[in-house]
Image (cartoon, rainbow, N blue to C red):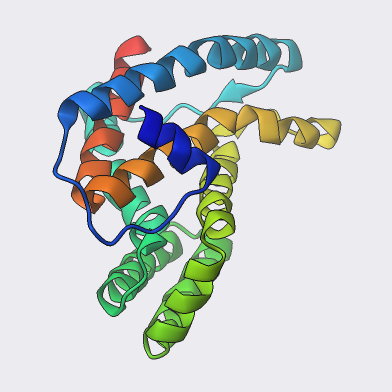
Amino acid sequence: MEYFLLFLKRPSLNNDQKKVEWRHIFIILFSFYLVMLPIGFFIKLMNSFFNISQKHLSFDILHKILLAVVIAPIVEELLFRILLVINKRNLIIFSFTSLILSAYSLLKAHYYYSVILLILSILAVTFSTKEIGIRNMTTKYYSIYFYAIAIFFGFVHFTNYDGISGFLYLWIPFLVLPQFLMGVFLGYVRLSFGIIYSILVHSVINLIAIGSL
C-alpha cells in the first residue's frame, strides 16, 4: 500500500514488472471502493438533482455482461493503458485496435468517432517509426503523461450519460471522477504487473458494478 501511495505522488515507468501479488491488488481494490462509495453516492445524488441519467443499452443481461466483463475491459485497456509502456509492439497493437473501432464506428454511422480513431491509428503507426524519441519524451514527463491518460479515460465516459446541456457541462469533471480514479488504479496495475492483469482487474470492477445494479 505504501508503494502505491508513493507511485501516486510520482508515477514512473518501471521496466521490471513485479511478480503478481493478488493480496496487494485486492487491498488496493478495497481501498479504491472505500474512496468510491461516498463519491459515487454524492454523484448519484447530484445527478438526480440535475436530471442526469445513465444511458441504458438495449441488450439482454447476458449481452450486457459480455460487453462489460469481456469486450469493454479488453478494448479500453488496449486503448488507454497499452501505451503506458511505449514500444513498437504496443504502438502496433494500439493502432490495430483503433483501426478496428474506427471501422465499427463507421458501420454504426458514428462518423466523428470513426475519423478520430482512424487518425489515432495512423499516428500510432507513424510514431512506431520514431519509437525511441517518443519513449524518451514521455519518460521525461511521465507523471504528466500518466495522469493525462487517466483524465482522458475519465472524460470519454461522460458520453455514457443523458441530460447534459448548458451549464451542466461544468459538472462533467465531477461526473467522471470515478472513471478517472479507476484509470489511475488500472494504470498502476498495468505498470506493476502487466496489461493482462489490468484487463482482468478491469473485468472484476465492471462485474462488481453490474452486480451492484
Residue that sits furthest to the right in the current view = 167
174 relative to 120, above or below:
above
Position in image of residue 76 (x %, y %): 37, 49
* In this picture, residue 127 sits left or right of residue 112: left
The number of callouts visible is 0
Position in image of residue 183 (x %, y %): 45, 41
Q: Quadrant of the N terminus?
A: top left
Toward which corner of the image does residue 163 lie, by quadrant?
Answer: top right
Going 43% across and 55% down the picture, which residue do you hit? 12
12 relative to 114, above or below:
above
* Between 59 and 113, the one nearer to me in the picture: 113
Residue 60 appears anywhere in the view: no
154 relative to 100, above or below:
above
Position in image of residue 70 (x %, y %): 22, 40
* In this picture, residue 131 sits left or right of residue 69: right
Residue that sits furthest to the bottom in the current view = 129
Residue 117 appears anywhere in the view: yes
Toward which corner of the image does residue 202 lie, by quadrant?
Answer: top left
Toward which corner of the image does residue 131 lie, by quadrant?
Answer: bottom left
Going 24% across and 27% down the picture, which residue do you hit? 24
Position in image of residue 49 (x %, y %): 73, 10
* Between 62 and 21, the one nearer to me in the picture: 21
Q: Quadrant of the C terminus?
A: top left
46 relative to 121, above or below:
above
Going 53% across and 28% down the picture, which residue do you hit? 178
